[in-house]
Image (cartoon, rainbow, N blue to C red):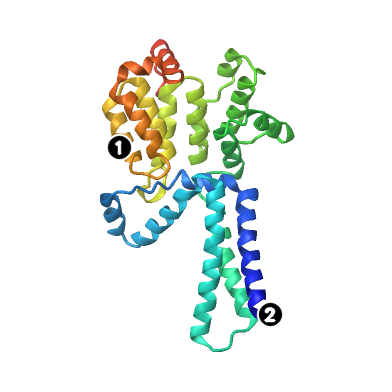
Amino acid sequence: MSEHLSTLAAVALGLGVFCFWFFGYPYILTAREQSALFIWDSAYLSDRLSMPWGWLSLLSTFVCQFFNHPLVGAMLLAALAVALAAAVCWLWRLVTPRFPWSAKLLAAAVALFVTCWLPLHPSEGTDEEMAYDYLMRQGRWQQICEKAQQQPPQSLACQNMVRLAMFQLGQLSEQALFEGLTSSNKVLANRASAFIMSDVYMNMGMVNMSQRAAFEAMESIEDYNKSGRALKRLVETSLITGQYEVCLKYISILEHTLYYHVWAQRIRHLAEHPELVAEHPTYGRCRQMYQQTKDVFFY
């Protein structure tokens, strides 16, 4: 009976952690991933391990790379919670032969603290910004507008995103979109808002501003970590503006990652054959807009 109860408790713990992340806070998982790029390269590994407590940072970054897909990330955290609880119970047995049910409650508390509470407090930005950003990355424009109707966003970046969503749905003209754009330095208040504005600027064809926002977002990451999302954007902007050597440098980094290497290999073909960029449906259009509009990098 005790073994059955332990098994049921482990299943309940894992299922609870999975539901907590996958249904409750998937946007925090993706926000974590975009600020922790794990590079499968010996130079990167040795550099990280040479730092004080570098192995811990390396382990955290290794786990965070799987948050690229919230389903995988939630499953991983659920498995980690069960493993931590089992480890605490095992350590308790080493210390004392008595193993009351209170020890299992302690094990569950430790597992929940590590897998739920700690990742729940990231420094990427506000909860509102991360939630809106998650919807924008999936192109869920209608849901963005519905969310804004229920409660108007407080963040300047989110307000810009809502206007972009309205434009995408045909509810706002292009002229009104540009006239209502907030582009002061206040809009780049934190990492999440910088990522949001990088996407907003890119959708509007403001390539240099998109590049600046992506760079600002990546430079704000702690421990000199890089960002797969930011590097992807820098690859795109470098490709559009004709900075092919810079583009290839960023591509070479992404080619040593788990979730970005296929995309990087596909874009390398464009970087090595610049004449194809003009024919690309997205980058070709952005290049035309970039060449025909004023340079607003420091606007």
Q: Which residue is mark 1?
A: 252
Determine the residue positioned at 36% across, 18% down: 277
> Compared with residue 132, is residue 16 higher up or lower down, i.e. above or below?
below
The kind of residue tagged 1 is Ser
The kind of residue tagged 2 is Met
Quadrant housing the N terminus: bottom right
Q: Is residue 275 left or right of residue 193?
A: left
- Residue 25 in percent (x, y) is at 61, 49
Q: Which residue is mark 2?
A: 1
The local crowd at label 2, few if under 14, some if 14 to 19, many if 20 or more residues have their Cα within 10 Å, is: few
Quadrant housing the C terminus: top left
Mark 1 → mark 2, Cα distance in angstroms: 55 Å
Determine the residue positioned at 41% across, 10% down: 292
Foreground mark, 1 or 2?
Answer: 2
- Residue 9 in percent (x, y) is at 65, 70
Residue farthest top in this picture? 292
Q: Which residue is nearer to you in this view: 238 or 14?
A: 14
Residue 20 has which mark?
none
Q: Secondary structure at mark 1?
A: helix
- Residue 263 in percent (x, y) is at 40, 34
Is residue 215 visible in this depiction of the protein?
no
Determine the residue positioned at 47% across, 24% down: 202
- Residue 125 in percent (x, y) is at 53, 44
The local crowd at label 1, few if under 14, some if 14 to 19, many if 20 or more residues have their Cα within 10 Å, is: some
Q: Is residue 226 left or right of residue 180?
A: left
Q: Earlier in the sequence, mark 1 or mark 2?
A: 2
